[in-house]
Image: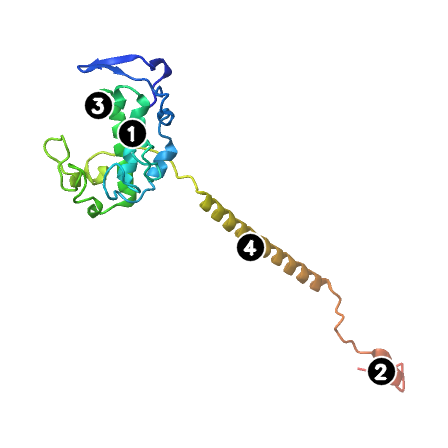
């Protein structure tokens, strides 16, 4: 979604509301919005398992809805100073696309919201949530479960859209989703488990080698414990030593 450097600060095809403007990463007063969301941000967002949490608004924490909108840290933690994912992409454009009332005029708006819908569809596919987790009341106007989505016509409720696209809406996204990086705790756990497995393997191999070596030594050892008949003493007792004793 980034714009080539040659387009920075230039005017683009206009609309009735005026020319489209973009100045990507040009808001030097807000360093946080001088980058686009990273693949890792998307991976973290998809790990937020709750669709929404009270107060069902832009200050909800551990809410997938609020996280994908970009009012929370990608991990789901609410931070009033943070703008991520959907919101961050808008603000990065720093022009027509960064203004709520004008952003639909920028063609990038369609790409951004299509991708946001793809993230939502992937979340639904992974968690297969029941509609009961969608707030029935106390959400902002238009955002409760049974409310109609504005400004679509004919009316369509939020409930009707809380479904996976391929199975219910007739379209699908082809996206290679980024994998979640391991946390420090997970890395330590994996390291410890790998070390224990390595120790177990070394122990088994060493034990097998020692046993094989012992068996080999025993097979080459002289038969010291075998008792042989002492023919010399019996021979001396014979009255006629020239005769054999059987």
Q: Mark 3 and mark 1: span between their CA atoms?
A: 14 Å
Residue bearing mark 1: 87
Label 1 packing within 10 angstroms: few (<14), some (14-19), many (20+): many
Q: Mark 2 and mark 3: span between their CA atoms?
A: 119 Å
Element class at badge 3: helix
Q: Are marks 4 and 2 in contact (CB under 8 Å)?
A: no
Element class at badge 2: helix
Q: Are marks 2 and 3 in contact (CB under 8 Å)?
A: no
Judged by depth in the image, the label closer to the viewer, 3 or 1, is 1
Element class at badge 4: helix
Q: Mark 4 and mark 1: span between their CA atoms?
A: 50 Å
Element class at badge 1: helix
Q: Earlier in the sequence, mark 4 or mark 1?
A: 1
Residue bearing mark 4: 200
Q: Are marks 3 and 1 in contact (CB under 8 Å)?
A: no
Residue bearing mark 2: 234
Say which residue appears at 45% left-offset and 46% top-offset: 185
Judged by depth in the image, the label closer to the viewer, 2 or 3, is 3
Q: Earlier in the sequence, mark 3 or mark 1?
A: 1
Q: In terms of depth relative to the viewer, which is nearer, 231 or 162?
A: 162
Residue bearing mark 3: 104
């Amino acid at each position: 979604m980034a714009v080539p450097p040659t387009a920075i600060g230039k005017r683009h095809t206009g609309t009735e509301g005026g020319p489209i403007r973009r100045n990507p990463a040009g808001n030097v007063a807000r360093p946080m919005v001088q980058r686009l969301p990273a693949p890792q941000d998307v991976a973290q967002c998809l790990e937020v398992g709750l669709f929404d949490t009270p107060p069902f608004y832009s200050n909800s924490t551990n809410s997938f809805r609020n996280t994908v909108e970009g009012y929370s840290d990608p991990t789901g933690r609410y931070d009033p100073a943070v703008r991520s994912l959907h919101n961050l992409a808008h603000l990065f454009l720093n022009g027509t696309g960064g203004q709520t009332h004008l952003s639909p005029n920028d063609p990038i708006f369609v790409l951004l919201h299509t991708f946001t819908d793809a993230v939502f569809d992937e979340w639904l596919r992974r968690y297969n949530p029941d509609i009961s987790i969608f707030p029935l009341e106390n959400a902002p106007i238009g955002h409760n479960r049974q409310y109609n989505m504005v400004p679509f016509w004919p009316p369509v409720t939020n409930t009707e859209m809380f479904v996976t696209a391929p199975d219910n809406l007739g379209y699908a996204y082809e996206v290679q989703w980024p994998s979640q990086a391991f946390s420090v705790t997970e890395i330590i756990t994996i390291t410890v488990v790998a070390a224990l497995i390595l120790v177990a393997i070394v122990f088994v191999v060493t034990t097998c080698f020692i046993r094989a070596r012992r068996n080999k030594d025993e097979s080459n050892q002289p038969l010291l414990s075998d008792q042989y008949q002492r023919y010399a003493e019996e021979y001396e007792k014979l009255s006629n030593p020239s005769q054999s004793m059987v």
